Image: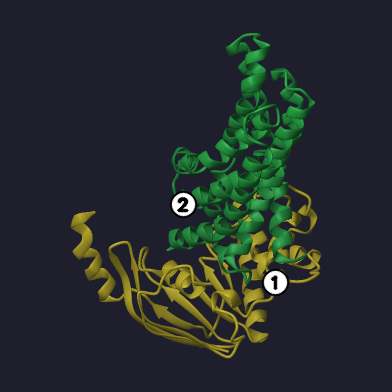
């Protein structure tokens, strides 16, 4: 499987966020996306996920299931955790596993892997920010999808959890998956390609639109 | 569990849990109808005559009550993003959410209606007709409201806009619902005529509603 972008452009509202972004990621490879705040890291991931319209350029996938869109083969771990406070930890995970049609998944394993094994019956309302993030990560483990789109995955995680996440990512890559991760720090993926979104383009366009607020 | 069953079960669970809309809707319904005799006075003839209209109006407002969170809650916590990335067509997901909404907010109204109908001096045939019209008509309210909920999804306080969008569209449902309920207690038209139109409204809105709502959601997510 190979995910490639050629001259990708993104426009949000009246602002050109980025243009001319190209990359290619194959199975077993990872791409770290770096850039200032507002450079379009999240927008790029959301474009790959099919949640933001592509303003120009092309995004293609080779291999994979031809019946499915890129978004339908991808996991998206965004800033929002997509958890319901009034449902328990297990109910939240069971819902997403069911919705993504994972069949009869053993939920105990992913929950234990992210360190929430003992909290399965606790309402998600009582989880800390880091625990909510871990529960979202458990979704990636419970349902197999080849593309992982991670937006600042380590932001609320403590050091041991960050190391666990790096392990999960490495084993996902070993299993033939591919990962796009937007981050400011180090996610623990050695040998990942790097994409910088700090092009002069986005800076100048931001200056140009500064006046109309 | 299939994706649609997962949505159905989750939404029903959410609406009966803390902060859900199931109990709120039916309590609102009971409260509004209970207040009517106090406002109108103990005129049994009057209450009996306008009883079906009061119950229908209260049911309409009550079913609107929990509607504004139908998609907004999923939008706010990021669930809608993931739902859009599912392999299930959005139209079907939306229809499953509507069904869950009807089962948890529409159905309790139908169960409560004959009980509080007693407060308005409705007799057995009138109660029966009322329940039948609510069964036939409340799905239309849900599916019309579904479109409004999808349009108002990104707005912080979309509830008022929702009411403004949805209430005018529900006028036909209200007219034929009340007409059918009144017909059963001795109106000029036979029961079957307005009742058939009511069924048609429900069927048409359940066919069109999910497509319109899904289109609105896709547009909003851009």
Dot 1: element: loop
Tag 1 residue: A143
User: Disc 1 or disc 2, which is closer to the eye?
Assistant: 2
- Kindly check if marks 1 and 2 are in contact, taking CB atoms under 8 A apart as contact: no
- Residue found at x 66% / y 13%: B45
Chain designation of label 2: B
Q: Where the N terminus of chain B falls, by quadrant?
A: bottom right
Query: In the depicted view, which residue is nearer to us: A99 or A173?
Result: A99
Tag 2 residue: B151
Let me know if residue B17 appears in the view: no
Chain designation of label 1: A
Dot 2: element: helix
What shade does chain B have? green
Q: Is residue B194 above or below residue B35?
A: below
Q: Is residue B217 above or below residue A147?
A: above
Query: In the depicted view, which residue is nearer to us: B64 or A135?
Result: B64
Horizontal and vertical percent for residue A57?
36, 82
> For the residues tagged 1 and 2, is the chain the same?
no
Horizontal and vertical percent for residue B192?
68, 42
Q: Residues within 10 Å of mark 2 (few under 14, many from 20)?
A: many
- Residue found at x 68% / y 58%: B7
Quarter-of-image position of residue A16: bottom left
What shade does chain A have? yellow
Query: In the depicted view, which residue is nearer to us: A99 or B188?
Result: B188
- Residue found at x 67% / y 28%: B27
């Amino acid at each position: 499987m190979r995910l490639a972008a050629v001259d990708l452009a993104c426009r949000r509202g009246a602002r050109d966020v980025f243009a001319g972004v190209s990359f290619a990621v194959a199975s077993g490879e990872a791409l770290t996306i770096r850039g200032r705040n507002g450079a379009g890291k999240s927008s790029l991931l959301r474009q790959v996920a099919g949640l933001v319209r592509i303003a120009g350029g092309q995004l293609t996938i080779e291999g994979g299931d031809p019946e499915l869109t890129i978004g339908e083969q991808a996991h998206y771990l965004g800033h929002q955790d997509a958890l319901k406070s009034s449902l328990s930890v297990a109910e939240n995970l069971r819902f997403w596993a069911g919705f993504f049609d994972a069949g009869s998944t053993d939920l105990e394993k992913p929950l234990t892997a992210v360190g929430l094994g003992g909290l399965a019956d606790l309402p998600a309302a009582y989880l800390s920010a880091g625990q909510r993030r871990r529960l979202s990560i458990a979704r990636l483990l419970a349902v197999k999808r080849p593309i992982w789109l991670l937006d600042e995955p380590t932001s609320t995680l403590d050091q041991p959890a960050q190391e666990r996440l790096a392990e999960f990512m490495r084993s996902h890559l070993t299993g033939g998956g591919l990962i796009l991760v937007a981050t400011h720090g180090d996610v623990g993926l050695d040998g990942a390609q790097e994409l910088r979104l700090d092009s002069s383009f986005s800076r100048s366009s931001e200056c140009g639109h500064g006046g109309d607020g | 569990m299939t994706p649609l069953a997962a949505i159905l079960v989750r939404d029903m669970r959410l609406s009966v849990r803390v902060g859900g809309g199931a109990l709120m809707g039916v309590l609102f319904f009971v409260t509004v109808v209970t207040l009517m005799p106090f406002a109108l006075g103990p005129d049994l003839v009057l209450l009996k005559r306008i009883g079906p209209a009061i119950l229908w109006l209260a049911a309409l407002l009550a079913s609107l009550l929990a509607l504004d969170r139908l998609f907004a809650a999923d939008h706010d916590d990021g669930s809608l993003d993931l739902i859009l990335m599912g392999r299930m067509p959005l139209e079907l997901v939306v229809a499953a959410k509507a069904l869950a909404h009807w089962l948890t907010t529409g159905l309790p109204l139908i169960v409560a209606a004959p009980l509080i109908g007693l407060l308005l001096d409705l007799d057995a045939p009138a109660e029966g007709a009322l329940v039948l019209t609510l069964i036939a008509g409340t799905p239309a309210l849900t599916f019309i409201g579904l479109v409004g909920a999808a349009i108002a999804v990104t707005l912080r306080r979309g509830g008022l806009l929702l009411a403004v969008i949805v209430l005018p569209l529900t006028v036909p449902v209200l007219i034929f619902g009340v007409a059918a309920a009144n017909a059963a207690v001795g109106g000029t038209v036979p029961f079957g005529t307005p009742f058939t139109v009511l069924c048609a409204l429900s069927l048409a809105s359940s066919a069109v509603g999910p497509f319109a709502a899904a289109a609105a959601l896709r547009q909003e997510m851009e």
